[in-house]
Every structure is written in structure tokens, then in C-alpha cells.
Image (cartoon, rainbow, N blue to C red):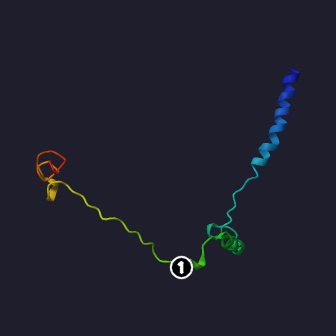
Amino acid sequence: MMKRKSMLAICMVMGLPSAAAAQGLVYAPLNPGLGGNPDLTGYLSELASIQNNFDEGGGGGGFPVIDFPDIDIDLGGGIGGGGSGDDNENGDGDSDPDS
């Protein structure tokens, strides 16, 4: 019985500091645009310029040029795709047009 009481006392004493530390965390925004301290604007701006990897002399600018290939869709039967079902010109069902 004495052992059980001492274990209970040890667990309570060890649990109290961790419970007290968990109550001390409070969210405070840093970004002035999200409600943070407006005096941090210069600090955050300088921090962003240090982390900036953009090359000023890179030229370019504007939008990138993307060259997509032409799309050719053969529906096998003219407008609407209502053909005979054969995709070749000779109509014999053979995929080799030379035979």
C-alpha cells in the first residue's frame, strides 16, 4: 500500500511541470499583414531579400514560349465519325494497305 502511494506521488510530481509548460504556448503572428507587429516589416523585408535567389541579369522576362505540337485526330470516317469501321482506305479490314 505504501509503495502504491509513493508511486502515485511521484507520478503527480513529474506530471505537474509538463502540464504547466504546455499552458504557456500562445500564438503570436509575425507577419504585419496578418496582425503581427508592424515594427517587424523592415526585418522581414531584409530577411526576404537575403533569401532571394532571383538573378537580376537573367534577362528574359515576359511569358515563356511553349511550342505545343499540332494535334491530328482521325475519327475514321469523315465528319462525325460515322464511317464503316475500317480505318484503312481499301476497306478489306487488313491494317496493311499494301496487301
Disc 1 target residue: 59
Does residue 15 appear to the left or right of 40 in the view shown? right
The residue at the point 19 percent across, 55 percent down is 75
**x and y percentages locating residue 72 in the rendered image:** 26, 61
Q: Is residue 31 above or below residue 98?
A: below
Q: Secondary structure at mark 1?
A: loop
Residue toward you, 73 or 38: 73
Does residue 90 appear to the left or right of 15 in the view shown? left
Name which quarter of the figure residue 7 lies in: top right
Tell me if mark 1 has few (under 14), some (14-19) or many (20+) residues whose alpha carbon lies within 10 angstroms of its own: few
The residue type indicated by label 1 comes to Gly
Name which quarter of the figure residue 44 lies in: bottom right
Residue furthest toward the front?
99
The N terminus - image quarter: top right
**x and y percentages locating residue 79 in the rendered image:** 14, 59
**x and y percentages locating residue 51 in the rendered image:** 67, 69
Residue toward you, 79 or 12: 79
